[in-house]
Amino acid sequence: MLAIFLKTLPFFALIGLGWLAGRTRFFPPEATAWLTKFVFYFALSAMLFRFASGLDLGALWDGRFVMAYLTGSLLVWAIGFAAARWRGLPLPDAAMEAHCAMTGNTGFLGVPMLVVLLGPAAIGPVLMVLTIDMVVFSTLITLLIHAARHGRVTAAMVLPMLRGLAGNPMIVSMLAGLGWAVLDLPMPGPLDEFLALLGGAATPGALFAIGAGLAGRAAQRLGPALWLAGAKLVLHPLAVAIAAFAIFRVEPVSAGIMVAAAALPVAGNVYILAQHFNVAVQRVSAAILISTAASIATVPLVIHWITKG
């Protein structure tokens, strides 16, 4: 267990360094925004393209894997939604809390960290989890909030959402990489070295940006935030584990990686959505801060459990 903790410690130390730089204003919010944009559009996209271009698409797709992750995640989503409605929150707030309870930081934290800690076998499952989160659940929250505010879903609402998905560099880079793999195109040496060099900036850049972004968050609305952080760090991986191992009998290595991805803290893009719709902003912000801090202890526990079989 200590060995796993020590392996994860450098990743969280980078987050802590970013937090310290942001907290002392040595790295101001404007710098964080530009660093995040560099990672999102360039470094992480290069890493995802390079990973995806080396995958076997036939081996990547596993219907049981998809159903297990969807089942576990939808269960947590439903619990989060029901708990919010029980507290008397309106539908948009309930939908945002549900989204917060099961959307992990797979892009900026999961892809760099889990591939290093769990090896190349983690690439396919982590990319599959990232795709489901972005395509299925981001679409779900957007449609629900629009429907609650306008009484119905129209083409005028759907088309901008589809354009947003099509313009998401993570989705574009993964699809481009999978297309490269399907066509079995050779990877020229200089291109591979360029992608490796640029993608190498994704891990430190993303982790530093996570920490710097957390520096501006305040731990307000602690009661709901603690519940949301607990749901994300405990309930989500537990539900996914039950679905993967007990119900759908997913291949053990892929199932373990799926659970590790589900154990990640709340994603920063949930806060972006909350700000965009002006829904549950303080609760989501505090849940990201608390879950990221607590994941220093919880993520090594989950990875220890996975690596011990």
Image (cartoon, rainbow, N blue to C red):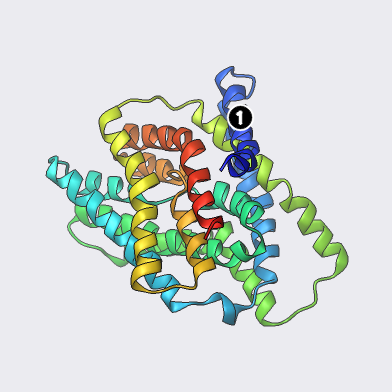
Q: Please, what is the three-letter code of the amino acid marked with disc 1?
A: Gly
x, y percentage for residue 74? 30, 61
Q: Is residue 128 above or below residue 42?
A: below
- Residue at position x 77%, y 56% from top? 196
Mark 1: give few (<14), some (14-19) or many (20+) Cα within 10 Å: many
Give the camera-side residue of 39 and 254. Answer: 254
x, y percentage for residue 251? 49, 73
- Residue at position x 27%, y 65% from top? 154
Give the camera-side residue of 141 and 203. Answer: 203
Q: Which residue is mark 1?
A: 18
Q: Residue furthest right?
A: 190
**Residue 115 appears in view:** yes
- Residue at position x 49%, y 37% from top? 297
Q: Is residue 167 above or below residue 53?
A: above
Q: Dividing the picture into quarters, in which one does residue 23 lie?
A: top right
Q: Please, what secondary structure does the residue beneath circle 1 have?
A: helix
